[in-house]
């Protein structure tokens, strides 16, 4: 089972999600630890090579950027509430910054 590493304030951000969203994201992170894909995801090449976005629909739109192709870990780069159709430049920039911190 892969280790999960939360970058920056990501774990605290997830803790601030509503319970239903937090639990749904937890189930998807467990799938990642087991080497499976989340049930709803898309690639986020604008953030970095191998970065994906897991999408949670639980009384709102919740997202988390992650990468699994570095070592034996799941790096959760950023988690946020999505309020518009497109991902905000601020969220993309934060994901890019944290991806660079991994040192890939």
Image (tube, helix red, strand yellow):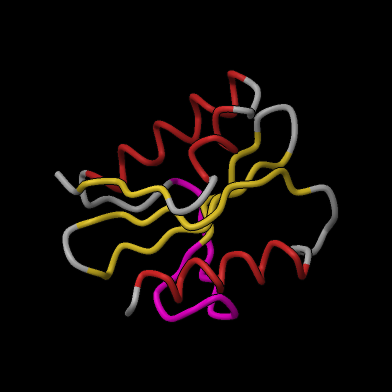
Residue located at (60% from left, 80% from top): 46
The total number of labels drawn is 0
- The answer to which of 4 and 51 lies nearer the viewer is 4
Residue 47 higher or lower than 39, as above or below: below
- The answer to which of 71 and 84 lies nearer the viewer is 71
Residue located at (45% from left, 46% from top): 39
Residue 102 higher or lower than 26, as above or below: below
Q: Quadrant of the C terminus?
A: bottom left
Q: Quadrant of residue 29?
A: top left
Residue 78 placement (x, y as % from top left): 55, 54
Point out the stretch of residues depicted in magenta: 39-52
Outermost residue toward the top in this view = 19
Residue located at (50% from left, 52% from top): 8
Q: Quadrant of residue 33?
A: top left
Residue 45 placement (x, y as % from top left): 53, 79
Residue located at (48% from left, 79% from top): 48
- Does the stretch in magenta take in 56? no
Residue 73 higher or lower than 56, as above or below: below
Residue 84 placement (x, y as % from top left): 85, 54
Classify residue 62 as left or right of residue 78. right
Q: Quadrant of the N terminus?
A: top left
Classify residue 52 as left or right of residue 33. right
Residue 57 higher or lower than 10, as above or below: above
Outermost residue toward the right in this view = 84
- Does the stretch in magenta take in 40? yes
């Amino acid at each position: 089972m892969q280790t999960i590493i939360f970058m920056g304030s990501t774990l605290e951000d997830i803790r601030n999600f509503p319970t239903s969203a937090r639990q749904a994201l937890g189930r998807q992170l467990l799938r990642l630890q087991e080497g499976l894909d989340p049930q709803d995801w898309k690639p986020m090449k604008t953030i970095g090579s191998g970065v994906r976005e897991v999408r949670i629909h639980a009384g709102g739109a919740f997202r988390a950027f992650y990468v699994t192709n570095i070592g034996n870990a799941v790096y959760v780069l950023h988690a946020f509430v999505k309020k518009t159709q497109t991902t905000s430049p601020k969220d993309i920039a934060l994901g890019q910054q944290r991806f660079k911190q991994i040192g890939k």
